[in-house]
């Protein structure tokens, strides 16, 4: 709990303790710790590279791992980029 309250993310705690980030969230909730919402965005300058990775056949999840975000974030970023073209 102290690490999280000191600023370590749920993903950081999951890595530190070799558990799933969702499990970290459950432990925090059970102990009455109010969690922070953290959405990692893909920088606009990286969108062309993400588009290339997707065109090469990489999954949203694999691309997300490279950028430290979820596959859903990758998908939403690409959808937004395609709608602005």
Image: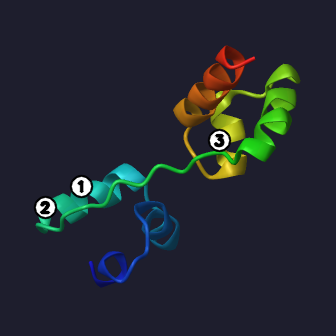
- From the image, which quarter does the N terminus lie in? bottom left
| Residue 68 percent coordinates (x, y) | 62, 52
Sort mark 1 into few (<14), some (14-19) or many (20+) by Cα contacts within 10 Å.
few
Task: Tell whether label 3 touches label 1 (CB within 8 Å).
Answer: no
Sort mark 2 into few (<14), some (14-19) or many (20+) by Cα contacts within 10 Å.
few
Q: Nearer the viewer, residue 52 or 1?
A: 52
- From the image, which quarter does the C terminus lie in? top right
Element marked by disc 1: helix
Residue to which mark 3 is pinned: 64
Question: Mark number for residue 26?
Answer: 1
The answer for how far apart the CA atoms under marks 1 and 2 are is 6 Å
- Compared across the picture, whether 67 is left or right of 9 comes to right
Instruction: Tell which tag, 3 or 2, sits nearer the viewer.
Output: 3
| Residue 44 percent coordinates (x, y) | 72, 42
Residue to which mark 2 is pinned: 30
Element marked by disc 2: helix
């Amino acid at each position: 709990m102290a690490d999280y309250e000191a600023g370590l993310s749920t993903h950081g705690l999951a890595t530190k303790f070799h558990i799933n980030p969702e499990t970290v969230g459950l432990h925090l909730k059970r102990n009455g710790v109010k969690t922070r919402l953290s959405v990692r965005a893909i920088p606009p300058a990286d969108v062309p590279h993400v588009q290339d990775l997707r065109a090469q056949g990489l999954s949203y999840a694999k691309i997300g791992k490279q950028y430290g975000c979820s596959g859903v974030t990758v998908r939403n970023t690409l959808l937004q980029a395609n709608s602005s073209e």
